[in-house]
Image (cartoon, rainbow, N blue to C red):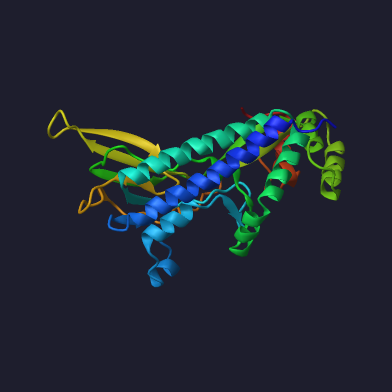
Amino acid sequence: MQSLPVAARIDLLSSFEAVLAQVDKFCAKARQDTALPAWVSRTEAELTENLDMRFKAIQVYRALWYENSQDGRETLTCPGIVGASSDTLAAAHACNRAKDDFKTAVLTIKALGQVETKEAMVDLHRRWEIVAAAMRRMGAARLNLKQAYRHIPLLERCPIKIGFTWSKQGRVIQRTSVAAARRLLEQRAETPQIRLEMQRLAEISADELLARVRSVCPHLRANIVFADSENSGRVSRRLMQAPLPILVPLQANEQLPDFVAVASEPPASPRLRRADVRIEDELFLPSIRMHRYRDFCRSNNSIPM
């Protein structure tokens, strides 16, 4: 087995150290802006406790780690608008650059192969065991790369209005051959579950098509309205993803832009079951989220694109 290149290992560790340092600096600056207003969506329990909204925003900005109960495909989301000084905005820019450098280092190692990636991440967690242990005591488990990568959303000028909307949850269905499913299983570490799924795969026709189903989690979007400085009464708009509270530049005694509070979780919207559903409810290969098509689709080969 080829060992992980020393330069790649050093880049990974140093870039992650820079992320932690820049997150600390940014949060310290944000904490100093207590005279500026902030709003974040709070749960019923947080409202009862009267949790400080700027404090909650800082907690969310620091959330680089999975919570123990968090699904491996999920990222924490918190709607919000936080007034920020010029120093805080500068610190946020530096934090985002550090996140980009860390992402580049991780992707460089991932390009080397699965074994090298696993070796590097084990090394990273071991080097930062003190941090990881502290996170575990607070209910966190392991580093969440998506949360470590994502930028702190910020604006260079204050808008007149911000409207939040939750995009609808859906799913992506990918037709997959038995051979492709076998290759996906072979990439996983050998466990009793993987062996069981390989056996299931061997028992069906090699020509059968399977359906790989990936849930698409709801995304929080912000529709931002700016006053046009050159044309009085006219506005310009910008749509952006807003998984974290948005930083807006404010001076002392200035207020947040107009907004309508939105819930911290997407509204429940039960899906009606289609009468012509073609995919079996039960997972056929759970480890790779693979379903079989129903009998009538298999028999007449009428699976649509």
Name the side, left or right, on which 79 lies relative to 302.
Answer: left
* Quadrant of image for the C terminus: top right
Of the pair 144 and 294, the residue shown nearer to us: 144
- Where 52 falls versus 265 (above or below)? below
Query: Who's the residue at 62% across and 52% down the image?
Result: 71
Of the pair 224 and 246, the residue shown nearer to us: 246
User: Which quadrant would residue 132 be assigned to in this image?
Assistant: bottom right
* Quadrant of image for the N terminus: top right
Q: Position of residue 36 (x, y in %)?
A: 28, 54
Q: Position of residue 138 (x, y in %)?
A: 58, 63
Q: Position of residue 125 (x, y in %)?
A: 68, 48
- Where 177 falls versus 54 (above or below)? above
Of the pair 10 and 155, the residue shown nearer to us: 10
* Residue closest to the far left: 232
Residue 268 seen from this side: no
Name the side, left or right, on which 5 lies relative to 13.
Answer: right
